[in-house]
Amino acid sequence: MIGVFDSGIGGLTVVRALRKKLPRARILYVGDVARMPYGNKSATTVNEYSHEIVRYLLRRGCRLIVIACNTASALAADSLREDFAVPILDVITPAVRAARRATKKGKIAILGTRGTVGSGAYQKELPPGSAALTCPIFVPLAEEGYAGTKEGKAIVAHALRSLRGKKISTVILGCTHYPLLRREIRAALPGPRLIDSSAVADDAVALVKLDPSLENGGKPSLEIMVTDRTAHFERLASKIIGSKVKLKVIDLESLSGIRH
């Protein structure tokens, strides 16, 4: 079984890509809605939350972990790989690879949370002169359903105004929530190619080819666990996946393995 986690619902954009490329996979998703966003948390806190979630995914039988969160990928991936003996994929490496491949001339820009951009994880892998812009407002915009609204379009355009006229040819959407605002970002930056975190699905495919048991083939399944649930999140999750889904709530004590 493949375990996937993010700070909220946005990581389901990665799940959508995984299901398309690995249609026989069993997938268990954890969205830490109660503690989102991770982008304004300290590295210590993001590491703690990420370790709790991975331990839970392993207890549930996952044998391949996908960190569908750019902040956790930047701040916790190395520590997770040191502490757990299963393949752990982050979303930064494949997105950088895809952006480099797509960029023949011009600059690459990374849009991300404060935690992701502040970590420098993307900047150290990108060519000199690449731009980095923090867009902390994008996560609540996406989670609260402002995609497709006039207000959302105006806020995104204002946030990205500093990139206009800078000869940007490729933009990395450095948060799994940002593809939910793809139309708004495209309207604000009509020229550049947009790369998002779904590129990690190709890395998962490569691992499954080496070890098909990671996919747990047979009857495909998707289980979505969240640390908080509202009717709005359920509707948004269904919209991302493309069919009606049911979110299951896991309390934080169970997530951390605490028993009273």
Image (cartoon, grey):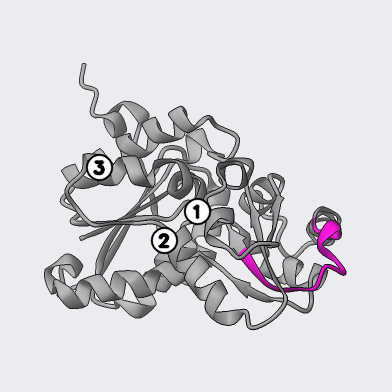
Contact flag, marks 1 and 2 (Cβ < 8 Å): yes
Q: In the image, is residue 6 part of the stretch drawn in magenta? A: no
Residue farthest to the bottom, as pictured: 104
Q: Which residue shows up at 47% across the image and 56% down it?
A: 11
Number of labels in the image equals: 3
Q: Which residue shows up at 66% across the image and 49% down it?
A: 144
Q: Which residue shows up at 49% across the image and 58% down it?
A: 237
What is the magenta range?
A: 160-172
Q: Gap between marks 3 and 2, in whole Å?
A: 34 Å
- For residue 234, which numbered disc appears in the image? 1
Q: Which residue shows up at 23% across the image and 57% down it?
A: 87
Q: Earlier in the sequence, mark 1 or mark 3?
A: 3
Q: Is residue 54 above or below residue 112?
A: above
Which residue carries the number 3 mark?
82
Q: Is residue 7 above or below residue 165?
A: above
Evaluate whether residue 4 shows in this view. Answer: yes
Please provide percent x and percent y for residue 214. 17, 66
Q: Earlier in the sequence, mark 3 or mark 2?
A: 3
| In-image side of 205 versus 47 (left or right) | left
Q: Gap between marks 1 and 3, in whole Å?
A: 34 Å
Amino acid type, label 2: Val
Amino acid type, label 1: Glu
Q: Within the image, what quadrant is residue 162 found in?
A: bottom right
Which residue carries the number 2 mark?
245
At mark 2, the secondary structure is: loop
